[in-house]
Amino acid sequence: MTDDKFYKVRPLIQHLNQVNKPKYSQEFYSIDEVMIPYYGRHSSKQFIKGKPIRFGFKVWAACTADGFLLHAEPYCGSYTNISDTGLGQGPNVVMELVKRINLEAGQHVVFDNLFTSVPLLEKLGDQGIGATGTLREDRLSGAPVMAKKVMEKKTRGYMEEAFTGCISVVKWKDNKAVAVGSNKERKTPVNKTKRWCKTEKKHVEIDMPHSVKVYNQNMGGVDIFDQQVSAYRIRMRSKKWWWPIFAWSVNAQVINAWQLYRKLGNNISLLDFIRHFAIAIMKGFGTSRVTPGPKKFPAGLAKDTVRYNGKQHWTMKGDQPNSRCRQCS
């Protein structure tokens, strides 16, 4: 008996990860979690409060900044295929996916506060890999930055930067206080962004740290992919637990194929691409007859003089019982 709770779909997932390995180098990548909706019974089904999909299977996903899926790893508790680095679950996921997609020195990975910690940023920095992510208040590792309650009272656009080792920790007041850590990006150069002002009833410009700008521009890769998958999700239902994962895998590959097709200069909507894809698949399963069937000749109509002469044309037994009577047709 195997300990892998996804043993039925593991060969499919491994094949997709092999096919989706990066074929060209990019600078920015993002790591996040994806939910596959499932409402049945399974020991790996998750519940995440506040998510659009609350019940289902959780998948750790690595994507490019524009939403191309590179690697997916289903979460199944302690049996998840993730190596232990001693940094915690979130950093373990990041280190494993960075290794799976073969990130090299000079490339940059972005993730949210579920994964980010100062030791993780330091470890990625030792490998020459840039990393940026939002930080929770209990993961600042003693960086001398303003407390959250004090920062909330500052005006919008206020920022400060502190260092813990070689890691930059930037706190910025937007609608709420945000902390961003990075082993590559810093507070400067300060950028401008527009926010809606309730008192002035218009958009106003406020200051934004550079590390926050890098995070906002490149963190959405997994969210873009997830949004595209949910736009035209396969709706065929099944009572088998593995079916949602199989359908999600097909959706994921269609999204990846559409993105590659557009990179070749073909401007086509996702819906039209799915239609062409479905037609091509259906044509591939059509087969022609090896031996043609008997030709059917429609019986010709009898002349009106015969049809309306008032005589009862009783049927008679003939040599061809399946033929139609020319006189009675």
Image (cartoon, grey):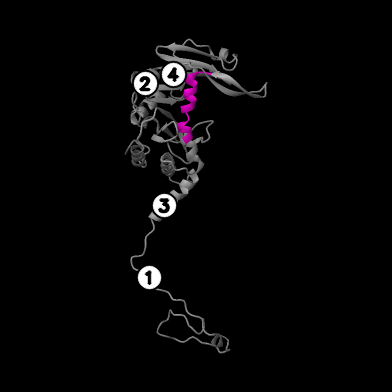
What stretch of residues is rendered in magenta? 208-224
* Of callouts 4 and 1, the N-terminal one: 4
- The residue shown at (41%, 25%) is 109
Q: Which amino acid does label 3 sit on?
A: Ala
Q: What residue type is labelled 2?
A: Leu
Q: Which amino acid does label 4 sit on?
A: Glu
* Of callouts 4 and 3, the N-terminal one: 4
Instruction: Tell me residue 58's x, y (percent).
Output: 44, 34
For mark 3, what is the residue?
280
Instruction: Tell me residue 274's x, y (percent).
Output: 46, 47
Instruction: Indicate which disc residue 124 carries.
Output: 2
Find the distance from the CA under tag 4 to the CA under tag 3: 46 Å
- Number of residues whose C-alpha sits closer than 10 Å to that of mark 1, classed few (under 14), some (14–19) or many (20 or more): few
Q: What residue type is labelled 1?
A: Gly
Find the distance from the CA under tag 1 to the CA under tag 2: 68 Å
Q: Does the magenta stretch include residue 219?
A: yes
Give yes or no for contact between labels 1 and 2 (Cβ–Cβ under 8 Å).
Answer: no
